[in-house]
Amino acid sequence: MLPPAAAALLGPVVMADFAGTAPSADLFDLIAARRLGGVILFAKNITGPAQAAQLCRGLQEHARRAGRPPLLIAVDQEGGPVERFPLGVPGAMAIGATGSVACAERAGRLAGRMLRTVGATVDFAPVLDVNTNPANPIIGVRSFGEDPQAVARLGRAFVAGLHSEGVAAVGKHFPGHGDTDIDSHLDLPEVAHGLDRLAAVEFLPFRECIRAGLGALMTAHIAIAAFDREIATLSGNLLDGVLRRTWGFRGAVFTDSLSMAAIREGIGAGPAAVSALQAGADMVLALGGPELLAEVFAALHGALERGELTVARLREAQERLARLQSLSRQPDPGDDPGAVAGAPEHARWIREIAESAVTLVRRAPGAVPLPPGPLRVAALVATGEDPSPLGAVLRGHGRQVEEIALGPGDTADWLRNASGPAVLVTRSRGRLPAWQAGTIREAFAALGDRLVVVATGTPYDLTEIPFIATYLATYGREPALLEAAAGVLCGTLAPRGRLPVSLAGLHPVGHGVVW
C-alpha cells in the first residue's frame, strides 16, 4: 500500500485532455484529488479566444483553491495546418521558403502572444523534424525544410519569439520524425539511419535549439534502428543517455500522446507511461478519454508500489516541469485575446511572411502574370476536403473566374474546354495521389503550357507531374498565402520564396526555373 505522500507524486507528471468547452466535474476532481499536472486544449475545447481565456482562468483558479501549483496548460499552436487558434500564420515550410529568421521569430511571437493572452503556458511547437522524405504523411509542411542547419536556425528564432511572450516552447518530435513514411498515429515508423547520420541531420536542430535555451522537448513514437529499434519515447538510451548525459539537457521531456496507435496497439498506454518515465520523460500525455487515463494512473501506481518507479525519479521530473513553468507569464491586465488575430501589426507580419514565402518554382514563357481574359480554376479535392478558395481570391484581384472542384473519378473535360489559361490547385500531404496526377495529365494534354498548377500542400507534387511548365508553391491554404499567390499570378507581387526542399530529378521545362 502506497503512502498518500508517494501516491500524490503521480498526478503532477500526467497531462490529460477533456471533452467539451468547459471543465467537467471529473476534470476538477483530477486536479484536486489526483493533483493533475497539466491539461492540453484542442479545437474541441475552443470556440474563440474569450471563451478559451475564461476556460484557462477557471482551470487555474480551481487548482489554486485546491492548494495546487499552477497547471501547465498546453496547446499545439504551430502555425499552418496546426493552429488551435486560427490566426492564419503560415506554417513552418512556408517560413522555410522565406529563409528569414525575422519571419520565424515573428511567427513564434504571434503564437506566443495568442497563447499568453488566453492563459495557456506551453506551446507544443516548433516542429524541429528535418523533412527529408517526400512521402512523409504527417510532417511535410509542418517542417521548416530538409536542411538541418536551416531548421535549427529558424527553430531557434521561433523559440525566441515564444519565450519573448512568456510561453514555454516544446520542440518536437525528438529524435526526428522527418524521414518516415508512416504516420505514428496509425502505426510504428522506423528510422534506419546510423549514429553519424542521426547526429548530422535528425539530432542537429534539437541540439542547437537546446544550446540556445529551449527548455522542453516532445518525443516521437518512432523506432530507431541505431538504438535497438526501441521506440524513442521509451528509450533510456535516447532520453537519459543522449539527452541527459551526452548533451547535458536539463529541461523537461513530454511524451507524445499515449493514445496513438504506435503505443496503444503495441505496448499499451499504461505500460508505456511507466517505461517513458523510467527512460527519462517527465510528463506523459494520457490523452484519449477516462479509460486510458485510468489505465495510466493504475499502471503508474502499481509501478511505484513495486519500486519500478522511484520517488526520486518523480521528484526529479516535477523539478524540471516547475522550471519550465517558470518560463511562462500570466496574461497582462487589460489583455484582450480577441484583439490578437485582428491587430494591424499582426496582420502585417502575417502578410509579410506569406509574401516572402510563395515560390514560383517553374514559369513557362508568358504564363505568369496570367494573360488577361476569362480564367478557369479547378481544385483537386479529396473526399471530405473543402475546395480551395483561390478562385474567389483571384476575383478579388479583378479576374473573371469560373471554378469547379474535381474529385476522384472526375475528368478534366471542364478544363479541356478552356479558351484561355487555367489554374489547377492541389493539396497533398506527401506524394501526389495517382488520381490527381492523372487528372493533371488530362488537363495538360489539352492545355499544354496554358495550365498553371498551384500546390497548396507540400511542393513534392511536381516530381509526379514533371511535364508541368508553370508551378507555384504556397505551402498552405492560409488566407495570406492564397492572397500572395494571387498577387504573383496577377503580376502585382514579385515571387520571393525559395524551395526549402529538393525535388529530385527535376530540370527546367522550356524557359522555366527550378529553384
Image: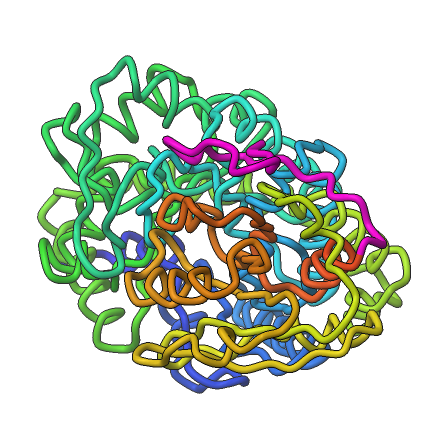
Q: Is residue 86 above or below residue 123?
A: below
Q: Choose top left, top right, bottom left or bottom right for residue 360.
A: top right
Q: Position of residue 393 (x, y in %)?
A: 73, 72
Relative side of 132 to 395, left or right: left
Residue shown at the point (84%, 66%) measured from the top left = 335
Q: Quadrant of the C terminus?
A: top right
Residue 28 appears in view? no
**Front-most of 310 and 392?**
392
Please provide the residue range marked out in magenta: 491-515
- Magenta-span inclusion, residue 287: no
**Front-most of 246 and 180?**
180
The colour scheme used here is: rainbow
Relative side of 172 to 175, left or right: right
**Front-most of 135 and 297?**
135
Q: Choose top left, top right, bottom left or bottom right for residue 365.
A: top right
Residue shown at the point (38%, 32%) measured from the top left = 504
Residue shown at the point (70%, 66%) measured from the top left = 479
- Magenta-span inclusion, residue 494: yes
Residue shown at the point (48%, 42%) measured from the top left = 143
Q: Position of residue 279 (x, y in %)?
A: 23, 36
Q: Is residue 131 above or below residue 257?
A: above
Predominant SS along the magenta part: loop
Q: Position of residue 441 (x, y in %)?
A: 38, 60
Relative side of 19 to 369, left or right: left
Q: Position of residue 334 (x, y in %)?
A: 88, 67
Residue 17 appears in view? yes
Q: Quadrant of the N terminus?
A: bottom left
**Front-most of 457 and 344?**
457
